[in-house]
């Protein structure tokens, strides 16, 4: 589903049978992710931004050549594809300082218990 306004969401699977990630992006995150992928793809046409778990920060965003087994793909109407490691869901947002991308987990009470 692709939304408009401050949040946009879309999801697709990386491979048959994989779990579809539920990832939303704020408007600021969409802008930052689109610019980052566009810049990376000038040097490597296969480059994608991958969202992965990180023991110290919760998650991190890294450049990758594509999805790993079990990853999901989030294709956004702004023209970028976010590769998401299995088990992650929430809203990608931008916080200060330095326009840091973060993943805000879904609130089970507002999503009907879905994660």
Image (spheres, rainbow, N blue to C red):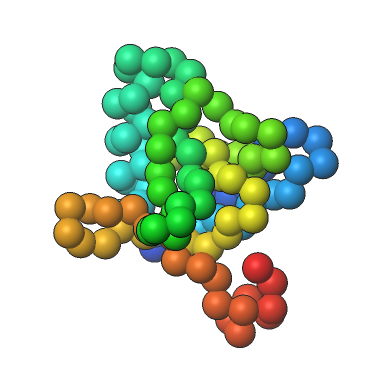
Question: Which residue occupies 48% across, 39% down?
Answer: 50
What percent of the width, then of the height, locates residue 28?
A: 31, 54
Is residue 77 at all visible to an observer of this figure? no
What percent of the width, then of the height, locates residue 106?
A: 55, 70
Residue 113 found in image quarter? bottom right
Question: Which residue occupies 76% across, 43% down?
Answer: 18
What percent of the width, then of the height, locates residue 7?
A: 45, 61
Most extreme residue toward the bottom, as rendered? 109
Q: Is residue 103 above or below residue 72?
A: below
71 or 81: nearer the eye? 71
Most extreme residue toward the front, as rendered? 55
Q: Is residue 104 above or below residue 60?
A: below
Residue 95 found in image quarter? bottom left
Q: Is residue 79 above or below residue 30?
A: above
99 or 24: nearer the eye? 99
Q: Is residue 27 left or right of residue 54?
A: left
Residue 41 found in image quarter? top left
Count how many numbered circles sit on residues in the image: 0
78 or 104: nearer the eye? 104
Quadrant of the drawing holding the C terminus = bottom right
Q: Is residue 90 above or below residue 31?
A: below
Q: Is residue 55 left or right of residue 97?
A: right
Question: Which residue occupies 32% across, 45% down?
Answer: 31
Most extreme residue toward the left, as rendered? 97
Question: Which residue occupies 74% across, 33% down?
Answer: 15
Is residue 55 at all visible to an observer of this figure? yes
């Amino acid at each position: 589903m692709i939304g408009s306004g401050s949040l946009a969401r879309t999801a697709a699977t990386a491979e048959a049978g994989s779990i579809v990630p539920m990832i939303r992006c704020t408007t600021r995150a969409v802008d930052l992710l689109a610019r980052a992928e566009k810049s990376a793809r000038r040097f490597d046409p296969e480059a994608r931004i991958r969202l992965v778990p990180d023991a110290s920060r919760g998650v991190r965003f890294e450049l990758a050549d594509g999805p790993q087994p079990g990853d999901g793909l989030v294709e956004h109407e702004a023209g970028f594809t976010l590769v998401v490691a299995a088990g992650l869901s929430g809203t990608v947002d931008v916080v200060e300082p330095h326009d840091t991308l973060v993943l805000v987990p879904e609130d089970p009470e507002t999503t009907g218990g879905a994660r």
